[in-house]
Image: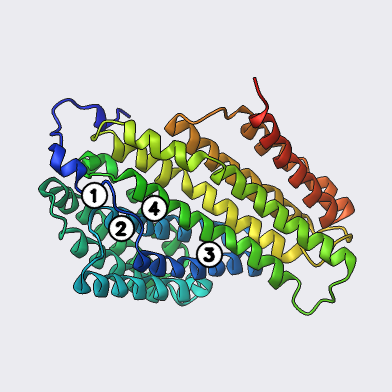
Amino acid sequence: MTDPARSADRPQAAPAEAAATETASVSTVELFFDLVFVFTITQLTAVLVHVPTVPGVLSVVLMLGVIWWMYGGYAWLTNAVRPDRADRRLLLMVGMAGFLLIALSIPRAFSGAGLTFGLGYLVVTIVHAGLFTRSGVPATVQAVFRLARFNLASALLVLAGGFLGGIGQYVLWGLAFGLQATTPFLSHIEDFRIQPAHFVERHGLVVLIALGESVVAVGIGLTGKAITPPVATVAILGLALTAALFWLYFGGDDAHAERALTNAPLARRPWLALYSYGYAHVPLLLGVVVLAAGVRMTIGHAFDPLVPVWSLALASGVLLYLVGDVYFRRTLGIGPNAARALAALAALGTVPFGVGLGAVAQLTLLVVLLAATLAVETKPA
């Protein structure tokens, strides 16, 4: 599919429009808004913990997909419309309430609470469109009107699926996810104006919050257990694994990403933002959820052979995170990526060690694998 951002006949923003928000940073109300994402990730992790089956995984993928589309949409929103007035902040709080309804519904979204999920999602979608129209840039307002109809259609699919339940819910939510993935090619998103510094910082904070779930998973997994040397060892390894994932994302890539977006032509920026922070972050965040579920269920079994599904969760979480990270880096021209791609595949090779020797063995191998990847990338040429 041809990238519409390359079309020569699309209008370019005036310099004043492009520079209007270049110096803004993430506000405290945005940080407060992002706290609800902690609960969302926790709830998605809980679904995998309690339903580690193919339907359970599929439901998590669908829920994360549709949630991330609108959650990312709010990052685009505050990138264009600063929440610096009381009316805007109040509307943002209404959107936050909608996300809270969604998060509360997640554990039973496919077994009775799908309608509540859909109602919360509809609220989030309507508030998003309403707030976006307050942008002072005419091209952005026009772009929102084109985008909003597709977002509303997706929200109605989610609502209908929640009402219907059963197989129909999976089908309709899958259609909503698919519509969202193709919406940018139908709505000319090049008319949006991206402020690189704010955009990169906001998404980085969301990733940081998500990684915090892996740390929380260590504590939950050890609830009620005596902190013996083996238990302390496996807890530290769990933290070390999260720290390695943190380092892979925040070890300079955020600065490179901001530079890549800043240097891109104005009409090209939204497409780079979509590919790198929209599409690429779905597997990355899914990896965090899967890994957190694996850590939560294995952290208390230092030397006991692991149940295969949880050993696979540890390895698959790292693999998905690295796949999303490589896609993110390739989109923005940040490299090299060969070591990370190889590490993603090698992560699966740790499963037999977890199944045969326990959590300490597998976590140690995963930490060593990621540390070696970082060492290879930082080695002087």
Three-letter amino acid code of the residue under disc 4: Phe
Percent position of residue 314, x then y: 70, 53
The numbered dot on residue 21 is 1
Where does label 3 land, which residue?
41
Percent position of residue 24, x then y: 29, 53
The numbered dot on residue 154 is 2
> For the residues marked 2 and 4, what is the alpha-carbon distance in whole angstroms?
8 Å
> For the residues marked 3 and 4, what is the alpha-carbon distance in whole angstroms?
18 Å
Is the C-beta separation of discs 1 and 2 under 8 Å? Answer: no
Three-letter amino acid code of the residue under disc 3: Ile
Residue found at x 45% / y 29%: 333
Residue 184 to residue 266: above or below: below
Three-letter amino acid code of the residue under disc 2: Ser
Residue found at x 29% / y 30%: 3
Which comes before the other along the chain, label 4 or label 1? Answer: 1
Which comes before the other along the chain, label 2 or label 4? Answer: 2
Which comes before the other along the chain, label 1 or label 3? Answer: 1
Residue at the outermost top position: 381
Percent position of residue 162, x then y: 39, 70
